[in-house]
Image (cartoon, helix red, strand yellow):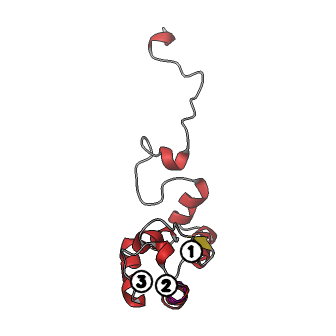
Amino acid sequence: MPRLLGVDIPADRPAVVSLTYLYGVGPRTARELCHKAGINPQLRARELGEDEVARLAALLDKDYVVEGQLRRQTSQNISRLRDIACYRGLRHRRGLPVRGQRTKTNARTRKGPKKTVAGKKGVKDLR
C-alpha cells in the first residue's frame, strides 16, 4: 500500500483512482498528476515504483493544496466568516444551511434529526 502525504492509498486500484483518496484530489486533478509525473493512469498503485511515488509527492507539495493544509485553510476561512459576523458566518455558527437553501423543510443534513415539539394543539381541540 503506497503512502502519499500521510495517507495510505489503495494498492489494488488504478493509480488515477487511488489518488482520489487524497483530500482535495478529484478525478481531474488525479489525471493531471499522472500526466505531469509521466505515469500510466491505468497502472495499479502497487506497481508504482519508489521514484514514481516520490515524483507524485513532490508534485503534490509544489503545485497543489491538499490534505492537512487544505483542511486548515478551509477551517480558517470559516472561522474568519464567524469572527466578522457576516450572514454566512452566522449561518455556520448556528449550524444552518449557508448557501440560501430553504429551512422550513429539507434542511435535515445541517439541522440534524427532527425534534418534535410536544403540546401542540390542533383547531378541533380548542372548542
Residue 38's image quarter? bottom left
**Sequence-wise first label, 2 or 1:** 1
Q: Is residue 116 left or right of residue 16?
A: right
Q: What SS does tag 1 mark?
A: loop
What residue does disc 3 label?
A: 33
Q: Position of residue 73 (x, y in %)?
A: 58, 77
Q: CA distance from mark 2 to mark 1?
A: 19 Å
Q: CA distance from mark 3 to mark 1?
A: 16 Å
Q: Which is nearer the eye, 12 or 5?
A: 12
Are the residues tagged 3 and 1 within 8 Å (C-beta)? no
Residue 61's image quarter? bottom right
Which callout, 3 or 1, points to the residue nearer the camera? 1
The disc placed on residue 64 is 2
Q: Which is nearer the eye, 117 or 2?
A: 2
Label 1 Cα crowd, 10 Å radius (few <14 / some 14-19 / many 20+): some
Q: Which residues are magenta?
A: 51-57
Inspect the image, locate mark 1, and give the three-letter code of the amino acid beneath it: Pro
Q: Position of residue 43 (x, y in %)?
A: 40, 75
Q: What SS does tag 2 mark?
A: loop
- Tell me if residue 124 comes above or below residue 99 in the rendering: above
Q: Is residue 14 visible?
A: yes
Looking at the rendering, in which quadrant would you find the N terminus? bottom right
Inspect the image, locate mark 3, and give the three-letter code of the amino acid beneath it: Leu
Q: Is residue 84 visible?
A: no
Which callout, 2 or 1, points to the residue nearer the camera? 1
Are the residues tagged 2 and 1 within 8 Å (C-beta)? no
The disc placed on residue 24 is none
